[in-house]
Image: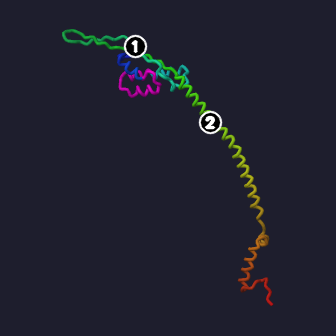
Amino acid sequence: MKFSRISPQKTRLVADMVRGKKVEEALNILRFTNKKGAHVINKLLKSAVANAEVKNVEEPEILTIEKIWVCQGPAYRRQMPRARGRANVLRRPTSHITIVVKEDMQAKEEAAARQAALEAKRAKKKAAKKAAAPKKEDKKEASSKEKVVKKGEAKAPAKTASAKKAAAPGATESEEGKKAKKTGGKSADTKEG
């Protein structure tokens, strides 16, 4: 940024705070620094990150401030009227601020390694799901076969009432006992004589 209306001495104080830092960390420092130079450098740093994105930087989060320097620009001279027709000269200094951002190669490699690890985990999960999927289908087929068998069992016991009596001997004894109670304790099978 050229011809910024701030003294280079004041701006260098802020520039020294963020030199060599990661972009995110520098933005946080600048956001909470109560100086005019912090506001100017914050805007310039955001612009530098946007330029890096346009120039096909893959991840702006891994950018670092490689270099930052502040040079003195021309000083505007203004006059302040004083007593007896005199004038004092007021100097309004300007600054030329330069920021160079660079990709942190170590951070880039770490990010690539993390991404590869995530991809490997996802591939394992997909493989596990594919391996588990046939088991689910087998379970579905087995449960459908069991349903068919259960339906067949439900149809087989449907017999006539007389067949049920013959099949269940306990049921016939209880019926005979009921008849004996009605006839006065005598069984129909017993012979009196």
Q: Look at 39% across and 23% down and name the residue there.
A: 38
Query: How far across and how far down the image is residue 160, in percent?
Result: 78, 69
The quarter in which the C terminus is drawn is bottom right
Query: Disc 1 designates what residue?
Result: 71
Q: Is residue 116 above or below residue 151?
A: above
Q: Is residue 39 magenta?
A: yes
In the displayed orientation, state which residue is furthest to the bottom: 193
Dot 2 or dot 1: first in sequence order is 1
Task: Give the spatial CA distance, label 2 vs label 1.
Answer: 51 Å
Query: Disc 2 designates what residue?
Result: 122
Query: How far across and how far down the image is residue 123, in percent?
Result: 64, 35
Q: Is residue 154 above or below residue 137?
A: below
The segment highlighted magenta reads 18-44
Check disc 2 and report its element: helix, strand or loop.
Answer: helix
Front position in the image: 84 or 101: 101
Residue type at the position of mark 1:
Cys
Neighbourhood count class around disc 2 (C-alpha, 10 Å): few under 14, some 14–19, many 20 upward: few
In the displayed orientation, state which residue is furthest to the left: 84
Q: Is residue 122 above or below residue 95?
A: below
Q: Quarter-wise, where is residue 159 in the image?
A: bottom right
Check disc 1 and report its element: helix, strand or loop.
Answer: strand
